[in-house]
């Protein structure tokens, strides 16, 4: 038996014994990965990233508003003290310090 006969016998055995079905399943599996679950997973990751970015933007706006109103209330407190009026309560205790 020569090398060509061995190769022919091996290829014939593979293709005749389900090798063709294996190759077809392999290529269809690769194709489904490109268009199926992996594609949906990439879309989900992109959606989560967009939601995270929107949440970060909302948190930043809320923080800016909080800081603005904190500055405004500090200014009012200063104006009251300069006018001789004590705010009620004079020295408020934050909720985190009350525990």
Image (cartoon, rainbow, N blue to C red):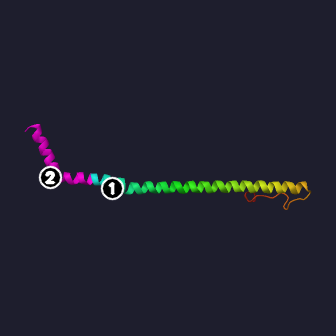
Q: Residue at x 86, y 55 (%)?
A: 79
What stretch of residues is rendered in magenta? 1-26
The crowding category of the residue bearing disc 1, from other C-alpha atoms within 10 Å (few below 14, some 14 to 19, many at least 20), is: few
For residue 6, above or below residue 77: above
Question: Taken as a whole, is the magenta stretch helix, strand or loop?
Answer: helix
Question: Is 13 contained in the magenta span?
Answer: yes
Q: Residue at x 81, y 58 (%)?
A: 92
Q: Position of residue 16 (x, y in %)?
A: 14, 52
Q: Which mark is residue 16?
A: 2
Image coordinates for residue 37, horizontal then vertical, percent: 38, 57
| Element class at badge 2 | helix
Between circles 1 and 2, the one closer to the viewer is 1
Q: Secondary structure at mark 1?
A: helix
- Quarter of the rendering containing residue 95: bottom right
Number of residues whose C-alpha sits closer than 10 Å to that of mark 2, classed few (under 14), some (14–19) or many (20 or more): few
Q: Quadrant of residue 56?
A: bottom right
| Front one among 94 and 86 | 86
The N terminus is located in which quarter?
A: top left
Picture disc at residue 32: 1
Residue 96: numbered disc:
none
Query: Along the horizontal axis of the image, is 41 left or right of 68?
Result: left
Q: Residue furthest bottom?
A: 88
């Amino acid at each position: 038996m020569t090398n060509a006969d061995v190769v022919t016998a091996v290829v014939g055995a593979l293709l005749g014994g389900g090798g063709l079905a294996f190759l077809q399943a392999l290529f269809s599996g690769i194709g489904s990965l490109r268009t199926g679950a992996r594609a949906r997973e990439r879309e989900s990751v992109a959606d989560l990233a967009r939601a995270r970015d929107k949440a970060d933007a909302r948190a930043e706006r809320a923080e800016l508003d909080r800081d603005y109103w904190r500055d405004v209330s500090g200014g009012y407190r200063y104006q009251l003290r300069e006018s001789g009026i004590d705010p009620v309560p004079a020295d408020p205790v934050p909720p985190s310090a009350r525990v």
